[in-house]
Amino acid sequence: MSADTPQDSPQAAPSPLGGNGTAAMSPGDEAPPGTPGTGESICRTCGGSGRDPDRRICPECNGTGKVTVGIGGA
Ligand SMILES: [Zn+2]
């Protein structure tokens, strides 16, 4: 039998942010906050209220009323 020591994938480094390893992104975000060429925009799904018509947390912006979207060209 081999005595090799099993090692985790080098890609499985722990994230300093914790959680799932990404910045706080909402499903409606096109890029993480702070990404060059992107900016905050009013969530088109809830119109900035952060709530859907049923008064639940808007799934697109996670209730923030804003999403990060690409701006400028393209
Ligand atoms: Zn929304």
Image (tube, rainbow, N blue to C red):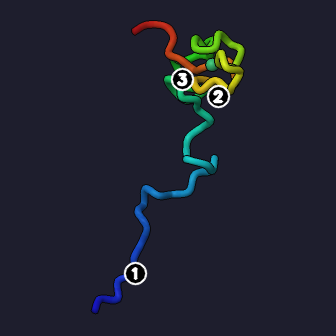
Q: Residue at 69%, 25% (x, y): give it.
A: 56
- Ligand 1 occupies quarter: top right
Residue 25 in view? yes
**Residues at discs 2 and 3 in contact (Cβ within 8 Å):** no
**56 relative to 74, above or below:** below
Residue 66 in view? no
* Residue 53 x/y as whole percent: 65, 15
Where's the N terminus, which quadrant? Answer: bottom left
The mark found on residue 62 in the picture is: 2
**15 relative to 23, above or below:** below
Ligand 1 contact, mark 3 (Cβ < 8 Å) = yes
Q: Residue at 58%, 11% (x, y): give it.
A: 44
Residue 49 picture quarter: top right
Of tags 1 and 2, which is closer to the observer?
Answer: 2
Ligand 1 contact, mark 2 (Cβ < 8 Å) = yes
Disc 3 element: loop
* Residue 36 x/y as whole percent: 53, 21
**15 relative to 48, above or below:** below
| Callout 2 amino acid | Asn
Disc 1 crowd, CA 10 A, few/some/many (<14, 14-19, 20+): few
Q: Nearer the viewer, residue 3 or 64?
A: 64
Residue 5 picture quarter: bottom left
| Callout 3 amino acid | Gly
In this view, which residue lies farthest toward the front? 54
The mark found on residue 5 in the picture is: 1
What's the CA distance linking mark 3 and mark 1? 42 Å
The mark found on residue 28 in the picture is: 3
What's the CA distance linking mark 2 and mark 3? 8 Å
* Residue 69 x/y as whole percent: 53, 17
Q: Nearer the viewer, residue 4 or 43?
A: 43
* Residue 55 x/y as whole percent: 71, 21
Earlier-in-chain disc, 3 versus 1 = 1
